[in-house]
Image (cartoon, grey):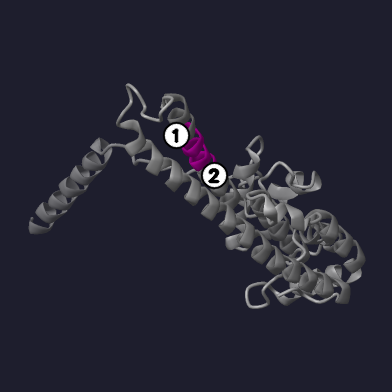
Amino acid sequence: MSSLRAALAVGALLAGVRRARADDPPPLILSPPAPPAAVAPLGPSDGASPARRLADALRRFEFGDYEGVVSELAVLVEAGARTLPPADRLEALRAYGIACALIGRPTAAEGAFLLLLKADPGARLEPQLVRPEAVALFDAVRGRNRDALLGAYRKGRGRRYAVLNLLPPAGQLQNHDYVKGYALLGVELALLASNVTSGVLLYSWQGEHKDFPGHEDAPRALRPLNWVSFGALVSVLAYGIIDGFVVGHRRRLEERRVEDSLRAGAIPF
């Protein structure tokens, strides 16, 4: 009897388990996650301005993405990079030449280095900052093209005339001191205007007896202005003349040193 009761209890338990399983919701089947979308590699800045291309190229250069540097600057350098300001043009040619040298494009690197040296014969690559293969290629380009570089340097510097130093700011402009030259020109014009204006007023207002009728106080104000402006103008002219000769002499020595270095195929320091 007891065994029968035990068998009935087990049967009821199994029936309850089956009913519980039948009432359970169907299992949730999870689909595998979709693979992440492929990220396209960053390409050249199509349609970007030359300045933007250069900025992107220099950013790539800092991270060692030399292929990216070439892709950014190829269009600019193939046209001589003449759409860039002079300083930016030199930087673009330098970065493009180094990048080409490091990715195995020596012909393109030599072309960029030659353009760089024609624009700036004193340019050099620092061995502490640039890998030796790029430095060696750059120096080789300088040595092979020393005659052409010397001619380009002489053509670019222009001729100098000592007589222009007697006419400031012509001497400063001849020495490529443009800021100083235009500053001198502005000061000279202001002093000359003050001197001429005060002199004309004094001449037109003075009477037959130099008593300035109707403008009795004018001489006390205008005469000092006339004398001071004249003295200051003479001083500025004297400074401009001396500066033109001194700076011109320094520039000639510098140019001679660069010429000697280019003639010898050495690096101008």
Locate residue 114: give its quadrant.
Answer: bottom right
Majority secondary structure in the magenta region: helix
Of 257 and 120, which appears nearest the observer? 257
Instruction: Give x and y (percent) for residue 186.
Output: 53, 42
Which SS class for mark 2? helix
What's the amino acid at mark 2? Glu
Which SS class for mark 1? helix
Q: Nearer the viewer, mark 2 or mark 1?
A: 1
Per the image, the residue denoted by label 2 is 188
Q: In the rendered view, does 154 fall on the left or right side of 51?
A: right
Q: Which residue is outermost to the top? A: 214
What's the amino acid at mark 1? Ser
The C terminus: image quadrant: bottom right
Q: Residue at x 75, y 54 (%)?
A: 163
Q: Residue at x 63, y 52 (%)?
A: 57
Q: Please, is residue 132 above or below residue 82 in the view?
A: below
Q: Earlier in the sequence, mark 2 or mark 1?
A: 2
- The part of the chain drawn in magenta is 188-198
Of 15 and 97, which appears nearest the observer? 97
Q: Residue at x 54, y 44 (%)?
A: 188
Q: Please, is residue 262 above or below residue 76 in the view?
A: below
Instruction: Give x and y (percent) for residue 209.
Output: 41, 28
- What is the count of numbered marks? 2
Q: In the rendered view, does 81 fall on the left or right side of 259?
A: left
Of 153 and 197, which appears nearest the observer? 197
Q: In the rendered view, does 160 fall on the left or right side of 52?
A: right
